[in-house]
Amino acid sequence: MSNNWVGDEFNNDWSPEVIFSQSQEYRTDSSQAEQMMLNLLNAPRDQQPHTCGWVVGGEACSDVLFPREFSGHLREHGVTGDDNAKMSCCWVGCDADPMNRESVLRHVVEVHLELKIECPDCGQTFTRRTTLNNHRRREHL
Ligand SMILES: [Zn+2]
Ligand SMILES: [Zn+2]
Ligand SMILES: [Zn+2]
């Protein structure tokens, strides 16, 4: 008698729906963790803080910022106004020719934050190492 009762309760706790929903949850957790690992391994630079090397009054700014904060931050360094206004990049050690204001932001991201990765085979640029790897597998093998 009591064995049957225990058996019923066991079945209720481990009904297929319960097991299914638990395994779904488990799958989600593990793939998120996996994704985070992959992100850290493959494309860390666009999620890591970078040091601002814009020279202000003879010294590099040295603020530490996330890449997405740089466009606002460079505005504080005077990278403002007309997109087509010519200006020079003031990043420490940079000898690039004067360029459009709009290009300065892109230039800083690509050249100084090194967020663009160049394909060694054809020179195309990518923001993520995984994208580059996929590209190389597809185009250059
Ligand atoms: Zn700065
Ligand atoms: Zn520069
Ligand atoms: Zn290529």
Image (cartoon, rainbow, N blue to C red):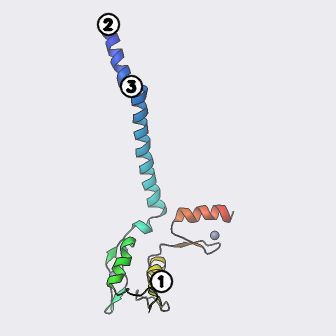
Disc nearest the viewer among 1 and 2: 1
Determine whether the beta carbon of the residue marked 1 sits less than 8 angstroms from the nearest atom of ligand 2.
no
Q: Which residue is mark 2?
A: 1
Q: Which residue is mark 1?
A: 103
Task: Name the image quarter holding residue 60.
Answer: bottom left
- Mark 3 Cα within 10 Å, few/some/many (few <14, many 20+)? few
Quick check: can you spot residue 61? no
Determine whether the beta carbon of the residue marked 3 sits less than 8 angstroms from the nearest atom of ligand 3.
no
For badge 1, the amino acid type reads Ser
Q: Say if 30 sits above or below 20 in the image.
A: below
- Tell me the residue at 37%/76% (across/down): 70
| Residue 88 drawn at (x, y percent) | 44, 91
> Which comes before the other along the chain, label 1 or label 2?
2
**Is 133 or 81 nearer to us in this picture?**
81
| Residue 68 drawn at (x, y percent) | 39, 71
Of the 4 image quadrants, the one containing the C terminus is bottom right
Residue with the most extreme top position: 1
Of the 4 image quadrants, the one containing the N terminus is top left
> Which comes before the other along the chain, label 2 or label 3?
2
> Which comes before the other along the chain, label 3 or label 1?
3
Q: Say if 27 sits above or below 44 in the image.
A: above
Numbered label attached to residue 14: 3
